Amino acid sequence: MFFESAAAEDGAEWGPMKIKGLNSQDRQRWPGLSGAALLEALPDAVLLADAEGRILDGNRRALELTQFTRAELQGLTLSAVVLNLPAPLPTLPPEEDGGRGTVLETGCRRKDRSILAAEVAVSGIGLAAGRGWCLSLRALAPRTAAQECLRAELSALQRSACGLALVDLHSRIQYANPAFARLWGVTRIEDLLGKSADEVWGAATTRRWLACVQARQRWVGELALTRKNGQPLHVETTAEPQLDEQDHLLGMVLSFIAVPQRKLALEAIHKEAEQQLRPAREQQDFAGQLHIISIPDLVQLIESAGKSGQLEILRSADGRAAALTFQAGQLIRAVCGDRQGAEAFYDALGFGGDAFHFRPDVAAEPDPAITQSTMSLLLEGLRRLDEAQHAPVA
């Protein structure tokens, strides 16, 4: 031990005082090394005090940490610098106890009266004038800030609505958040950890992702998978490389977002509508039911296809109809009941018809009152429909 009892002549000067340095056995093992040199080499701040807690000296790190000069420290007590120390100080541990003491997390009061979170080790030490106290102080602020940052990041991952997972280069799942477990219908996250990812989404998919991240690339796409209970699962997936601080590849970071059923249904509707519009590309009449596709979707498809002709919207309940005429996808005339122009188009969007008929051979003179593009008219019409649906009932 460096601070076991030793003869006073073995002491070494440190500031204006002497501390008992290395014993004879230590001097044989480390010739030329003094206790003072050792204390100055320590990365921690060290304060030495007498049995009553009066500070006798400190190393350079202690001066930096407390912002006091050596002369200023020597006029203070330990309790003036270190918070929450017991008063009076407890009895010094016996010398034969090896100098063991206690470690506590508290605060260090600096010269500018700021408080620095610190870990303090308190122990007894042999001094030239008798037994005293040795306090080792280590600032906790950097470590605590890093821990708080990690805690915040982990909390964000755990609370994310996006399913997240870390998979190593051997295809084993190393981490999964609750959203990931919910996506796959797994009750306990622990049941996923260490499991082969191949069992979750198939070996071919894992190989595709691994090949991508090993090339330091990102994979993005949609997948049709199967949950644990056999139900289908459609997800938007991103696979990115997981790298350490030295840029070594550790595995891959996977994120999963469930594709809403509404989106899938809309894609199916558009696909069916495209099939219905295909005859129009061949300049043939076509018709359909409005429970398959909505009027706004029909207008959008005609606009995007750049078609010319007249779209008739039929309402069998009272035999009324609305007519929208297009030229190269742009609305040029609209009639709905007694109304014409843009207002007639807006009425047609909420007309409530149950069938439609598109006639590509019908032409009409452009209505000079219609000056906006089809998409502008459509967006305004949808806004009006939304306001009408949410308007308070009188």
Image: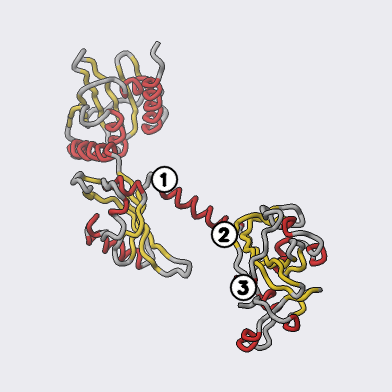
Is disc 1 surrounded by few (<14), some (14 to 19) or many (20+) residues within 10 Å? Answer: few
Residue at 75% from the left image edge and 55% from the top image edge: 80
Is disc 2 surrounded by few (<14), some (14 to 19) or many (20+) residues within 10 Å? Answer: few
Q: Kindly check if marks 1 and 2 are in contact, taking CB atoms under 8 A apart as contact.
A: no
Residue behind mark 2 = 143
Q: Secondary structure at mark 3?
A: helix
Residue behind mark 1 = 159
Q: Residue furthest top?
A: 394
Residue behind mark 3 = 96
Q: Position of residue 18 (x, y in %)?
A: 76, 76
Choose mark 2 or mark 3, whichever is in front. Answer: 3
Q: Secondary structure at mark 1?
A: helix
Residue at 72% from the left image edge and 52% from the top image edge: 114
147 relative to 244 in the view: left or right: right
Residue at 41% from the left image edge and 30% from the top image edge: 372
Q: Earlier in the sequence, mark 1 or mark 3?
A: 3
Visible in this render: residue 305? no
